[in-house]
Amino acid sequence: DAWTATDALLSDAGAPDAATADGGVPPATGRVIYPDDRSLSPITSDVAAGLRAIAARAAARDDLFSKIGDSITVSTSFLDCFDGTRVDLGGRDALRATLDAFAAADVGGVTPFSRTSLCASIGWSASAALAGSPSPLVSELDAADPRYATVMYGTNDVGFRSPFAYADDMLDITDTLLDRGVIPVLSSIPPRDDSASADANVPLFNLIVRGIAQGRQVPFVDLHRELRPLVSHGLGTGDHVHPNQFGGGACILTAEGLGYGYNVRNLLVLTAFDAARRALASEAAPDADALRMSGSGAFETPFTISSFPFTDLRSTATTGARRIALYDGCAATQDESGPELYYRLSLPAATHLHAWVFDRGAVDVDLHLLDASGASAGCIARAHQDLEADVAAGTYYVVVDSWVGSDAVERSGEYVLVLTSS
């Protein structure tokens, strides 16, 4: 497709569109789902309208982007080569206008492709972008005034930091960008082939990022998905952490070049930037159809979990009923009289469920697994943040409920829910 410039490497599909949303974020029901069988998140008409609403929040330079990340982003193999002559788009001529627009831009005497970012450094975790006053993230935005940003942290977080702290940081980074009218392109992280224990946690960290991108309806690129089939996962044989590159250069996007990690990342990010630029220009959205979240979160119309893995970003502060205050089926004594949201799932076979809830700051929402009755007496298991249960085939509800402390204050608010099965 000339518009998306996708090919066998980046083959994506979806299903029915919905009405355009107001205010830059689609409504709670009908939100476009970012499925794990796509490498580029869908850009429907309402997602495109949301990106235009983000850009309207603040003036910025539409020909600039910033690089936000760790050593995998600092590397001159990432995007820098688009500033030179060793570029082969592999027949994707539709990407040329975006490449040329950024290559013609001047920021401090260089282009955004080759510019050294103030918010990308070797060894950084997501927390480093937010440390200090002003933070490296704010300093970078002040210095460059970009309209777009490519964001990837996590390689130095997984195995070293709590996923709960990571989720907080990634939400803060994303929202800082959005408040400044910057459109972030969030990315999953590569495998960690240097450490089996760290690599085991990579899928969870990537689901957190996918959930944030989906919740904010901003572009997401699944680098991890594209690297998995490559020889050595597209990683260097020296450290098994950083992507490798084609001998002819990291911006050679031919079939041969796309056997290497940095070449794949360069194509993914350039394609995502191109889609975002076209959305701001009000060109026809590439995705007329997309999968959408069904339900409203009420018990009568719960959100539907139709496949695993599942991720969703919501807030009990803006939606939710107060149907259950005490989950007596789990012999719970915690006051959950704050608002709750319901998710329904139907399992065709016995399954091991694993659910996490990542809440923000002072927010305190808890997880509850209920049987088909959806009643407090039907509580099977509950947890503060991390719930596991072996269940038989059947219908169940996952309920995210707001805790109320002894001070009678509801700890309702925003969270990312992640659910997997095995």
Image (spheres, rainbow, N blue to C red):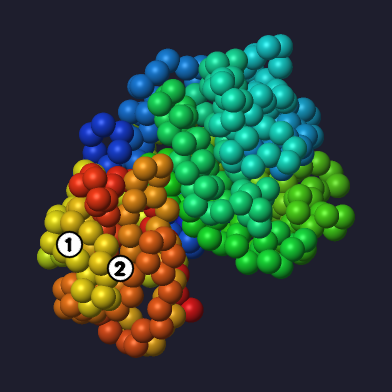
Mark 1 → mark 2, Cα distance in angstroms: 12 Å
The residue at the point 53 percent across, 60 percent down is: 204
In the figure, 247 relative to 199: above or below? above
- Near-viewer residue (84 or 24): 24
Q: Which residue does the numbered mark 2 point to in the structure image?
A: 368
> Dot 2, crowdedness within 10 Å: few (<14), some or many (≥20)?
many
Q: Of discs 1 and 2, which sits in the foreground?
A: 1
Residue 96 rendering spot, x and y as whole percentages: 60, 32
- Near-viewer residue (42 or 90): 42
* Lateral position of residue 63 relative to residue 332, left or right: right
Q: Secondary structure at mark 1?
A: loop
Label disc, if present, on residue 351 of the rendered structure: none
The residue at the point 36 percent across, 55 percent down is: 312
Query: Can residue 395 be seen in the rendering of this structure?
Result: yes
Kind of residue at disc 2: His
Residue 358 rendering spot, x and y as whole percentages: 42, 53
Kind of residue at disc 1: Ala
